Image: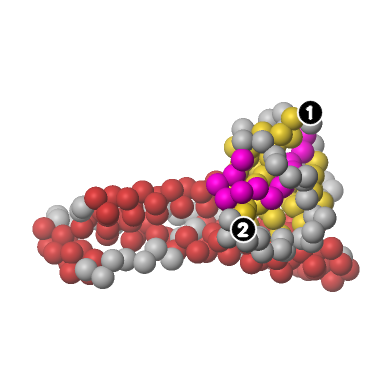
Amino acid sequence: MTIDLHSLMAPYALDALDADERATYEVHLEQCDDCRSELAGFLETSSRLGELEEVAPPPAMRAEVLAAARRTAQQRPVTVLAPRRLRHRVPQLVAAAAVALALAGGTATVVEHQRASDLQASGDKMTSVLTASDVRTSSEKATEGGTLRVMSSKSHDAAVVVGSALPQLDDDQVYQVWAMHDGTPRPAGLIGAKPGMVYVSKVAGADAFAVTVEPKGGSERPTTDPLAVTPVTA
């Protein structure tokens, strides 16, 4: 089976390739100017998955957790074996912090717990697409610099859209992604004011993705011309 070596960039950045795949891609990387120029930006973007660990606990959490632990019956630990190497990248500290915060109780705790759970769920969805056996990759250079890269999976009916090396925007602007259906744009998520990535579900029927600069919070319809339009690879 022939593999599009460009499609290995995402799992390479996430350290999800086996030794043979990694060696093959690194040979390709030495010969491909496009991959070398994009990889640094993609690594920076993919670090958002790692940032899911950075949930700062409130100052009083230690005392509250210790007190809660003394009141809570201890249970036998449950061990979950991850099926792939990539699972060690999923932020286990987030789950631990979320459980500890839940024990502490209180409205703020519930909100923080939900935020941590949402972040981890988002990271899990992205990695499931990036490491899917049927992932397909396409990219297009943006007119103002950077690249719009689309990694889509039919089996997951989802895509991860990455704005790599895009210029920093003003605080009142964001990069917005649009799923194109026969030329009609549908809102697909916000990347933010700098390079980033967004998970898009229910992508069946989309023939391309586009990115525009929009007011903070996004728009219902594009208000500027697309910086890049990247077709979806079948």
Badge 2 local density, few (<14 within 10 Å), some, or many (20+)? many
- Residue 124 point in image, percent of width and height: 52, 50
Q: Position of residue 108 (x, y in %)?
A: 27, 54
Look at the image and give the residue range highlighted in magenta.
207-219
Identify the mark at residue 182; answer none if there is no mark. 1
> Residue 198, can we see it?
no
x 74%, y 52%: residue: 149
Residue 209 at what x, y percent from top left?
Answer: 74, 41
**Dot placed on the residue nearer the N-terminal end, 1 or 2:** 1
Residue 216 lies in magenta, yes or no?
Answer: yes
> Is residue 137 a member of the stretch shown in magenta?
no
> Residue 14: horizontal and vertical position, in percent?
62, 62
Q: Residue at left 16%, top 60%?
A: 68
* Quadrant of res 48: bottom right
Q: Tag 1, which secondary structure?
A: loop
Residue drawn at (82%, 51%) of the image: 140
Q: Residue furthest left?
A: 71
Q: Is residue 217 visible?
A: yes
23 left or right of 34?
left
According to the picture, the residue beneath numbered tag 2 turns out to be: 193
Within 10 Å of disc 1 (Cα), the crowding (few <14, some 14-19, many 20+) is: few
Do residues under tags 1 and 2 come within 8 Å of each other at their CB atoms? no
Residue type (three-letter) at the residue carrying disc 2: Ala
Main secondary structure type of the part rendered in magenta: strand
Question: Residue shown at 50%/64% (left/top)?
Answer: 51
Residue 142 is tagged as: none
